[in-house]
Amino acid sequence: MFFSFFINSLSNQSSLVHATSSRYFVIKDKKIPFLPSEKNNEELFRKHQIMFLESLGIGKNIIFRTSQCHGNSAYVLQDPNISMNKVSQFEADAIVTHLPECPIMVLTADCVPIVIYDPVKHVTGVVHAGRLGTQKQILSVTIETLSREYGSRSKDLIVGMGPAIRGCCYEVGEDCALPFIKNNLGKSEIVKITNKNKFFLDLPEANRREGCEAGVLNRNIYTGGPCTVCENQRWYSYRKEGNTGRLITMTMLRPRS
């Protein structure tokens, strides 16, 4: 049994499957770590991916991901015959596709996982938005890619954010906070400064605001995912744990008649 996280506004879309995995699954009342921090165990990694897809009713043994680099590039998955290995060689922090039955994913352990769906053009995307990626506007880049490649309109997009470190727990140095302060003057919700001169950055809020500025309707943006630090018993958190496992956030289109 998996304890995955779902976003209601996306779950209501019958032609889309999406989810974020938790840090464990249960077999015969025993909790088993999902995607633990064991290095160089590709066999376990693949086994867990397939199990996760099966838990969502997806009978596939493929799931595409890129090499995440905290940048602002989006990869367009266009070839249904391309191998997972080839896609994994591309450096990008977002993937978009129009291909049905082709699951795409990002890995996170505090960074914001974002699923995007255009119910008009029937295309989807998934984004890895850490501090640097958010600073480089990876969400806007992905929205622009959907517009350029598929003719998506921002106002049609549904955007949902999964488990991530939130402003309550994400303390950063002044040097990390300054770019967000400079770019969001008067918008105190993104960076909060305490009376002890500590800086707390709210990445989901920063991405919500960026989505709105890119033309996505505020009512179509979901930011209410859990905090990976506050609820560390369920979600992996690099900030709290250091070396730790990873969460999968995936999305996949179903064929539409």
Image (tube, rainbow, N blue to C red):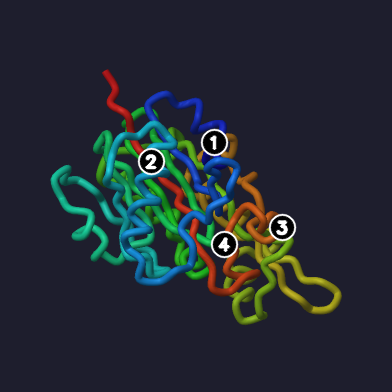
Q: Give residue 220's mark.
A: 1
- What's the amino acid at mark 3? Cys
Q: Give residue 201's mark.
A: none
Q: Earlier in the sequence, mark 3 or mark 4?
A: 4
Mark 2: few/some/many CA within 10 Å (<14, 14-19, 20+): many
Q: CA distance from mark 2 to mark 4?
A: 22 Å
- What's the amino acid at mark 4? Asp
Marks 4, 1: nearer the viewer:
4
Does 17 sit left or right of 175 as displayed?
left
Q: Earlier in the sequence, mark 3 or mark 2?
A: 2
Question: Residue 74, how many percent across, how many down?
Answer: 32, 57
- Residue corresponding to mark 4: 110
Question: Residue 132, how many percent across, how many down?
Answer: 49, 70
Residue closer to the observer: 110 or 133? 110
- What's the amino acid at mark 2? Leu
Q: CA distance from mark 3 to mark 1?
A: 26 Å
Check the image and name the residue furthest to the top. 257
